[in-house]
């Protein structure tokens, strides 16, 4: 089972990816981690990527795509993988698809988390972190996990918010890239959606991201 997972920041796709990893024993691969691992490990691709990153430039697809493919060929991916956070634009989608085809890596599913942009933004800005455990669910904009005051709804610990979660400019910038249906991340998702019209071995799944965590999980599992 090989999966591409799309969803805006705040949609909960990282959480759902972890659930799928545990349930189906597949590798959950986040694109940012691939860069960090290659740079830390001193790989040739990592060294090339670092040169661009150190200059504040975007890493070219000619480096990024091979890095992704190399990761998908690791032993922990032999039973399947879920790639989260890549591709981020239509050109990358086209190049990734060509590279997967060249390596005879077949996509099984493309998953898109549907979520209104305003709701996604509120979820990010509403996140609160517990001093005892950051994984304790607390969000002032989600009724099911809304804390009372400034204390964790799970353990009573003090809550705080991350600075980047309150940076509206940064959130809007990331979301502008994601919700762009012409050249951005949604355009890359739709590229694969169009492929399903020609290749029925690939299934395109949409999920109602505004639902609670368990409901989204149940819907996802039922569609796989």
Image (cartoon, rainbow, N blue to C red):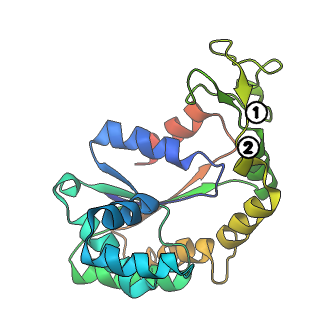
Q: Nearer the viewer, residue 146 or 202?
A: 146
- Residue 80 lies in what quarter of the image? bottom left
Compared with 22, 52 (above or below) is: below
Residue at the spot of label 2: 123
Mark 2: few, some, or many residues within 10 Å (few <14, many ≥20)? Answer: many
From the top left corner, tell me how far across and down residue 178 is, in percent. 65, 68
- Residue 157 lies in what quarter of the image? top right
Disc sitting over residue 142 in the figure: 1
Disc sitting over residue 118 in the figure: none
Q: Nearer the viewer, residue 47 or 124?
A: 47
Q: Nearer the viewer, residue 200 or 121?
A: 121
Compared with 176, 20 (above or below) is: above
Q: In what element is the residue under mark 1? A: loop
Compared with 61, 120 (above or below) is: above
Residue 1 in sight: no
Which residue lies at the image location 71% right of the left edge and 20% below the top edge? Answer: 158
From the top left corner, tell me how far across and down residue 200 is, in percent. 37, 71
Compared with 155, 182 (above or below) is: below
Between the residue at mark 2 and the residue at mark 1, the CA separation in whole angstroms equals 7 Å
Figure label count: 2
Contact? badges 2 and 1 (CB < 8 Å) = yes
Of callouts 2 and 1, which one flags the residue occurring earlier in the amino acid sequence? 2
Which residue lies at the image location 69% right of the left edge and 19% below the top edge? Answer: 152
Q: Nearer the viewer, residue 121 or 59?
A: 59
From the top left corner, tell me how far across and down residue 204 is, in percent. 48, 63
């Amino acid at each position: 089972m090989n999966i591409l997972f799309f969803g805006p920041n705040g949609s909960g796709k990282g959480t759902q990816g972890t659930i799928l990893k545990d349930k189906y024993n597949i590798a959950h691969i986040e694109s940012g981690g691939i860069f960090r691992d290659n740079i830390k490990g001193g790989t040739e691709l990592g060294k090339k990527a670092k040169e661009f990153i150190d200059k504040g430039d975007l890493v070219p697809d000619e480096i990024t795509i091979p890095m992704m493919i190399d990761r998908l060929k690791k032993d922990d991916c032999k039973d399947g993988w879920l790639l989260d956070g890549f591709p981020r634009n239509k050109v990358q989608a086209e190049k990734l698809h060509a590279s997967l085809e060249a390596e005879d890596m077949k996509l099984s599913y493309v998953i898109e988390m549907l979520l209104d942009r305003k709701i996604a933004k509120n979820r990010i800005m509403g996140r609160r972190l517990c001093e005892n455990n950051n994984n304790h669910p607390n969000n002032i904009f989600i009724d099911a996990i809304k804390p009372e005051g400034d204390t964790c709804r799970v353990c009573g610990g003090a809550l705080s918010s991350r600075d980047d979660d309150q940076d509206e400019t940064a959130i809007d910038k990331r979301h502008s890239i994601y919700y762009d249906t012409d050249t951005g991340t949604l355009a890359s998702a739709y590229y694969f959606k169009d492929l399903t019209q020609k290749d029925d071995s690939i299934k395109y799944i949409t999920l109602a991201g505004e639902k609670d965590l368990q409901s989204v999980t149940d819907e996802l599992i039922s569609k796989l």
